[in-house]
Structure formats: C-alpha cells, structure tokens
Image (cartoon, rainbow, N blue to C red):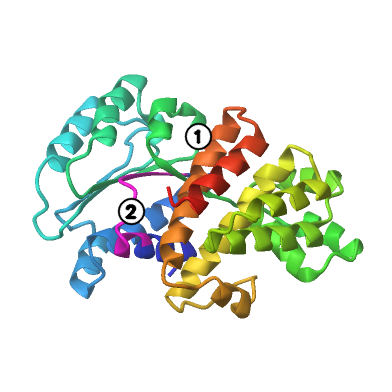
Amino acid sequence: MSLRTDSFRLAKRNNKLSHAFIFHGTSYDVMMEEAMAVSKVILGEDQLTESKVSSLNHPDLYRLVPTEDKINKEDIDDLLHQMNRKPTESENKVYIIGAFDKLSVYNQNRLLKFIEEPPNNTYAILVTTNLTNLLPTIQSRCQLIYFSEIDYTSISDQLKREDVPDKDIQILSRSIKTVHEGESVLAEGIDLKSLHQVVQKMTTQLFNRDLDVLLTLNEMYKISTKGLIVHYTLNVMHLIVSEQLKSEISVSGDEIFSTSYLQSLHHEKSTEIALLISDHIDEGRKKLASNVSGKLVLEQIIYQVVKGR
C-alpha cells in the first residue's frame, strides 16, 4: 500500500477523484505498477476484483502498452470502442496507456476530446517518461503526478556537515524532484528549519481556512525571496497534505511529520480541504511552469482554499 494509493482511495471515498491522471517520471515500471494499484482502488478492492485486475482479466480495465515502440491507430480505435461501453462488473471503467509519449500528435488529438469529456465513471491513467512529448492541451486536462527517483546521499551528507537537523534533511529529501533542485535549494542558503516551520504554520492555517495565512506568507518571504522558494514551499506543503491524508485513514509508515502535528489538522472537513489544497497545488505548478509569478500563484492558492473554491 503506497501513500499515493491511499490518496486515491480517500479521493474516491469523497467523490473528489479526477477523471484523468498523468504519471510522469523516470521509472516506467514503477509507474505502471502504481497504475495497476490505483486501478484496483477505482474498480473495487474485493479479492475477486483485485485478482482479475492483476491477471489483466477484468472487463472494465483496458491496458494499452506500445508494441515495437509505438501505439497504432488501430489500438486507439479499440480503446475508444471499449471505453465507450458501459461497465459490466464494476461501477467504473479504467484505461491505462503506457508510454503515452509514443503516441503520434494525430492520435493524441483523437484522445483529447475523450479525455475532455469522458463517459460517466471512466478514468484515464496516462504513463510517460517524457512529459514534453505530450500535447500541452492534454497535460492541462489531467492531474499530473510526478514519480521521483533520486539519490539523496550527496545532499544529505552536505546537510549533515552543516548540522541541519535530521528531520529537515528528511523533509528536503522528500520534497525535491531532482538532485539539481536540491542542490539549488542549498546554494541559495535558505534556512531550512525556519522555512519548514513557516510552511507547517501556513498549512495549519489553510486547514483552518484562516486568512492570517497571508501574514505568514510574508514570514516566508523574510526567509527568502528567491524564485525557487515558491516551488519548494509547494512541494513541502504537498508532502504535509499527503501525510495528513494518510493519517486520516490510520495508515502509519515512514511519516516525517509528528503524529501530534498531523492529528492537529484533523477536523470534520479536513479531508475535503486536503484534497482541495492538493488540487490547487497541482494547478499552481502548471502556472509556475508557464512563468506566472510565484507570489501570485501562492496568493491564489491561499485565497481559493480559504474561500473553499
């Protein structure tokens, strides 16, 4: 059971599940394995369903992987035909497309309308190791989930030499997407302990929909005004939200943040707010990639979460 799978389970339970996901990163096999695990969550987690999914014998699961390094027009024809049919055993249908970047622009465009307006209870998981080969219009209509595969040793060793607390080393290691990003954070000389404390405070205020979070945002900018701090802050906040969602269903494991802190975020609407924050962080990352001001992105996230939008 992975943290991501737990998050999907909670999203499904609260009717907050996106209809389309892009799994992107460097480890294709890991992402495909996670796609299968998520399919079990969506289709049903009883023993028979899980067995059928594992054996690729479930009628409501369609899994398409490239042959000879390409996906043909006929494969897309068959996928569209299968997915336009009603579910037969589950309430939902799932289609997984591996190596989605191997699709031609023509075939990606054919799938675009289907991704935009899917049949009811139909979910897409698109897996790629080359996100830049996916049409921007497809990326904008999916929830992007990044799978990192990083050797943290050199970064961790440097931080230990600088007497950075182990907890803050762990937070950094879980929050960066590449070694280069971690090195960039270190190069800017950011006080990690102070920043992590401020991000925890901001996240608590977001869970309470407290507008004083805007004042705390100013505390963050006193620590650093570098552009990278916004990216990193969103990553740390996402890590907190992920662990909070995991704690909601009493799943323990390798959490970094204390049980008392995570429990302090729990209340009647905390799951709803956690999913809302996660969604807005995903949107915020897209805006940052389009060179939208980091300060504006953070303020928009804060406003939308506090107002419950």
Q: Please identify, in this view, whether the residue under mark 2 or under mark 1 is nearer the observer.
A: 2
The earlier-in-sequence mark between 2 and 1 is 2
Circle 2: residue type: Leu
Quadrant showing the N terminus: bottom left
Rendered image: mark on residue 130: 1
The image shows a total of numbered marks equal to 2
* Residue 55 percent across, percent down from the top left: 24, 61
Circle 1: residue type: Asn
Q: Is residue 156 left or right of residue 66?
A: right
At horizontal 66% and vertical 63% (from top left) the residue drawn is: 200
* Magenta residue check for 16: yes
Q: Nearer the viewer, residue 260 or 53?
A: 260
At horizontal 37% and vertical 53% (from top left) the residue drawn is: 35
Rendered image: mark on residue 179: none
Relative to residue 287, is residue 190 depicted above or below? below
Q: Is residue 284 left or right of residue 42?
A: right
Q: Give, as a single range, the part of the protein colored magenta.
A: 11-23
Q: Is residue 139 left or right of residue 228?
A: left
Relative to residue 132, is residue 56 depicted above or below? below
Q: Residues within 10 Å of mark 1 (few under 14, many from 20)?
A: some
Rendered image: mark on residue 17: 2
